Amino acid sequence: MRIWQTILTVPLLFVSVPVAHACSCYNGVPIQQSSEKYRDRAVFTAHIVGLMGRIYNWDGKRQSSQVLAVVKDRYWGLPWYWPKVVVLDGSYPCDIAMEAGQDYLVSGRRERYGVLDVAGCSRTQPLRTAQIDLRTLDGSRCAGPGGTIIGRVYRGQDEFHENPTAPGVTLTFRDQDGKIYSAQSDRAGVYELQHLAAGIYTVDSRFSDDQYVSGGYITVTDGVCLEDSVLIRGYEISGRLLPGLDATVKLVGVKSADAGLHAYFQADGRFYFKNIPDGEYLLAVESGLQGQGNDFYYPGTFDRRQATRITITNNKVQGSNEFDFKPELLPFVSIRAAIDPPNDSGKFYWRILLTTPDNILEEQRWTPGIKFVVLYGLRGRSYGVRLWGDANYKKTTQSLCQSKDFPITANPGMSLIRVALPAACR
């Protein structure tokens, strides 16, 4: 099930330190003193002088999840009476490995005297990759009105290796009303958009005839900086489906069920394929809505025999490499839903669910400040729209709250659905 996160979710790992074990996460909120997320942390720079415990070898560099570090610049949260040499413990959960002899920007939770927990998504990282956090440290860039999107632009083939930054690149973002915002990366490859109204933003992924920008949804919050670092990648086949649809776009062999070639599906609804072996293919969409084994084919049919054939020869597409599905041919219908009233007491964290009598098909998290969420159903099918609230224990002793299903039939051009908050949960 697809969920719009209350913080940024991006498929890039550039600001993460190497992961020592099979646990990964992404914290898209840069270090900022104005944010409650970091006020109880100790933030400082340090030089790694010794490795403790198990030692890893990452591309010939000696690293460990537990290290000795000499404190250098103190920003906040580290008491004056703490020792000059501290232990940085990144061993649990989501281990991170730190390299001997390198300078780091540290964001840690104080444990016992002289020991700080820097594991998980703390944004502790080598100083050479911490340019975004160094800009946002004092919170001045993040101040209201509105919120800030900041990030680096890279060029490369994948997100798992260091890629060169891209200065002078213009990015385009859109809000939920379709209003356009542009930003250009500076000499360091960093771009910035300040004072954006709270809400959901997406980056336009189409960059050129053979390149696209890999990015995601950004849920902007007042007075907070969010990072959306993006990667400019090459592609061979492109097309458009529907923004936010929970689906897989794939190339299947004309003579086989699945060639195992899945597209990079972006938040703006566009999809891209790269490194396609020579052959003859069909373009298919697979979604849990239509059921397993019931793929929908380009240009608009459930019948494989009527699907358009795509031929790849010498790694090039024969004919056009653009395959935009026409919305009127698709079986999917967008369903916009909002909480009414939009500003509740904050006692619950709300999700908006799309249901059938037997199942929950989709869910979207509701974030204060957004205008609506988008769910998808099959054309002509009947569903229910329900609110589900998980308790915010700082404000209520209730464990959960949910509304009755609001009945709908999925048809094109539906009006915005306003689901009333249950009176007992306001």
Image (cartoon, helix red, strand yellow):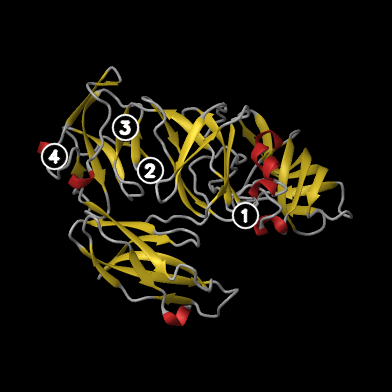
Q: Which residue is at a point 29% across and 35% down the rendered structure image?
A: 239
- 403 with respect to 86 (left or right): left
The reply to whether discs 1 and 2 touch (Cβ–Cβ < 8 Å) is no
Residue beneath label 2, please? Answer: 268
Of the residues shown, which amino acid type is indicated by label 4?
Arg
How many marks overall?
A: 4
* Distance from the alpha carbon under mark 4 to that under mark 1: 51 Å
Of the residues shown, which amino acid type is indicated by label 2?
Asp
Q: Is 382 located above or below residue 316 in the figure?
A: below
Q: Which residue is at a point 39% across and 70% down the rendered structure image?
A: 387
Of the residues shown, which amino acid type is indicated by label 3?
Ser
Residue beneath label 4, please? Answer: 304
**Neighbours of disc 1 within 10 Å: few (<14), some (14-19), many (20+):** many
Residue beneath label 1, please? Answer: 223
Q: Earlier in the sequence, mark 2 or mark 4?
A: 2
Residue beneath label 3, please? Answer: 238
